[in-house]
Amino acid sequence: MQSLRFTALEGLTGVDVKIKPELNGKITDVFGSNVFSGRTMREHLSDEAYKSLMNSIKAGTKIERKMAEQISSGMKSWAMKKGVTHYTHWFQPLTGTTAEKHDSFFTLKSDGTSIETFDGDALVQQEPDASSFPNGGIRATFEARGYTAWDPSSPAFIIEQGAGKTLCIPTIFVAYTGESLDYKAPLLKALAALDKSAVDVCNYFDKNVSKVTATLGWEQEYFLVDEGLANARPDLVMCGRTVVGHAPAKGQQLEDHYFGAIPERAYAFMRDFEEESYKLGIPLRTRHNEVAPAQFECAPIFEEVNIAVDHNSLLMDVMAKVGKRHKLRVLLHEKPFAGINGSGKHNNWSLATDTGVNLLAPGKTPKTNLMFLTFFVNTIKAVHDYNDLMRAAIASPSNDFRLGANEAPPAIISVFVGKYLAEVLEAVKTRVNNKFDEQDEAILKLDLHRHIPELLLDNTDRNRTSPFAFTGNKFEFRAVGSSANCASAMTVMNTIMAKTLANFKTEVDGLIEKGEKKEIAIMQTLRKYIVDSEKILFEGDGYSDEWAAEAEKRGLPNVKTTPRALDAYVTEKNTKLFIETGVYNEKELHARYEILLEDYVKKVQIEARVIGDLATNTILPCAISYLNTLLSNINGMKTAGFPESAYKAQKQIAEKISEHINVISENVQAMIEARKVANKLSDSREKAIDYCEKIKEAYFDTIRYHADKLEFLVDDKIWALPKYRELLFLR
Ligand code: ADP
Ligand code: MG
């Protein structure tokens, strides 16, 4: 029987590329048409209900029972007009995917009358039987009750699957006992803490500010692979990455893909998923080819972080679904192919006030520039103080393949500020001293103002090797992985910022109480923070070995693997941080830590099994079959009386193949034994470290090395797995 590889290769020529017509040039016609927000809300809600919903969105307060009834009824009438039959609470459990359980509006009254209902209770709270989501021991399965609760700050939306339409209500997911079990609940708590401390600090400069939100613009990288070819690779199906595969003769060295013309088939897919995204209110703006062959990127216009996170989760779902229509597999894994670039998801982050000011954009006046400088320096201080947590926030088994692999920022967290701002920091450091008085302050402020150019968005002053770079009016956290839920990084970012700003206020207030003038107190504290955080600043090449050595000298951590990076979540200092800011209580924090360790173990375990299976029942059989061909050829030549020199090459190849077969087989056996040992460990951390160091690091690369040699040696016609050159270049 022909292998799936060749069936898939034959299938490629029959792919019919259909590009949707452009939207008459107007995206605004469809934008947000499946979202219950803005105008739609106004149309379907009474004045009273509309106001109450708006207030609760602004203030983050609960919605009254009576209002919930009115809102649900408005939502239902809107949804039914659009052909919706079912609704679901939509949430983001810690599995890394989104979750839905559909219920219909349809119901029977006690007298048998059938009607469609959607009451306030159904909107506000649900109890999915969700006992199988990760809970880190918080919910023993016998009390499987966790519930989902409406997050009014993220608008409801309609998902279409063919003719089926479902109303989705964004919710948080919590245990019956109140502990959070998802990504959204802690993010909302971090944002509340940030709001409070950022408003306090803003009020030093502007009394009109009453709310501060964080903004996020993510840049999603991904690979596209033909579905038929992907299906012929059990590793892509099960792990989302290739665990074996010989490097193709041509990779990305010609740099001919980056920003090149988008291939037709990819373009057709993009047009399609973009349109779906627009309907859902996801403000996509950019699309282009990335560095690696078959790699692409899309990015939206930034939004308030909670909504941006929901939109990214939604986008990842939409992409997978639309990909199917185009017979394409969307790979969100951080490192689907060895030897060529992996994928990240830059998180562009900033802070915005309700008065319309971007707090990380240089100001127009000396005073607003001091406000900018305050938030800028506090960000640096936050990253300095909690760089271990930032590393933990981006830790995942898949991102471990990418961090520090000379294409992505290293596992060392540092901050890049650029030449101008480095000089500004230096000026504050040298000019603010004990004798610093009002006049000095006024002069310094003016000097700084002159020094901070209004527009820092100069591409020449960019460092693409830094994990956390200031890019003119925002910071760009580049180490986030492509498959991650942004909430993980954003929760930590906003929590550490909340805490740092709160400390800042305490220090400044302390100085003011001692009789210092406000602006001098601010300058003094900023100077202190600059001095304290100096070691986190790095302007050079983050990919270089020199930086790793330098960082070590500076005492900056360089934690390369997830099981060890996660330690940062539960240190005494960081536990205190999460408790004080109200983001996690101790139980939640430990549960989350457990879940992340368990997730690590499970994913590495699956990969180990896939490697073992592939080696044993696909790679070795291909190699043995070719070996048999060689042997019968050798025997035939011998029988026909050829001298040994005539079949020398065949013999050498046969020897090499048999050698690789033996090494693979031995390593697969040893890896199975190592798993047995690891599986007996009861401590999650120990187990995760064992899986990392004694299984993954000990065997994966070795097995792969020999498998790839076999791929090179064995007759192409009998090799069962699609090759890199096919996965990456054929479409
Ligand atoms: P790049 O050169 O890195 O692609 P862009 O200016 O195109 O930079 O922006 C990348 C992302 O940053 C976009 O999603 C954009 O909307 C977002 N962004 C811009 N300003 C902000 C901001 N103030 N807060 C958060 N994200 C922002
Ligand atoms: Mg970027």
Image (spheres, rainbow, N blue to C red):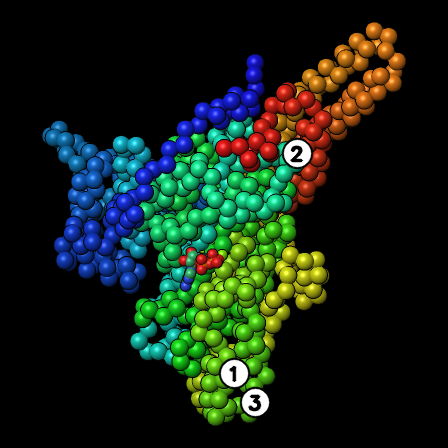
**Residue 277 at x, y percent in the picture:** 34, 45
Pick the residue in front: 623 or 559: 623
Q: Which mark is residue 533?
A: none
The spot of residue 41 in percent (x, y) is 20, 52
Instruction: Give the residue at x 79% y 20%.
Output: 650
Judge by depth and name the residue closer to the eye, 143 or 527.
Answer: 527
Amino acid type, label 2: His
Number of the label disc, if any, that sits on residue 246? 2
**Dot 3 amino acid type:** Asn
Q: Is residue 56 above or below residue 693?
A: below
The residues bearing labels 2 and 1 have C-alpha atoms spaced at a distance of 58 Å
Q: Quadrant of residue 604?
A: top right
Q: Residue at x 39, y 57 (%)?
A: 302
Binning the other alpha carbons within 10 Å of mark 3 as few (below 14), some (14 to 19) or many (20 upward) gives: few
For residue 524, which numbered disc appears in the image?
Answer: 1
Residue 391, image x and y in percent?
A: 57, 56
| Residue type highlighted by circle 1 | Gln
Report the Cα–Cα distance between label 2 and label 3.
64 Å
Ranked by sequence position, the earlier of labels 2 and 1 is 2
Query: Who comes first in sequence, dot 2 or dot 3?
Result: 2
Q: Is residue 572 left or right of residue 509?
A: right
Residue at 29% across, 44% down:
23
Callout 2: few (<14), some (14-19), or many (20+) C-alpha neighbours within 10 Å? many
Q: Secondary structure at mark 1?
A: helix
**SS at circle 3:** loop
Residue drawn 43% across the image and 48% down it: 287
The residue pinned by badge 3 equals 434
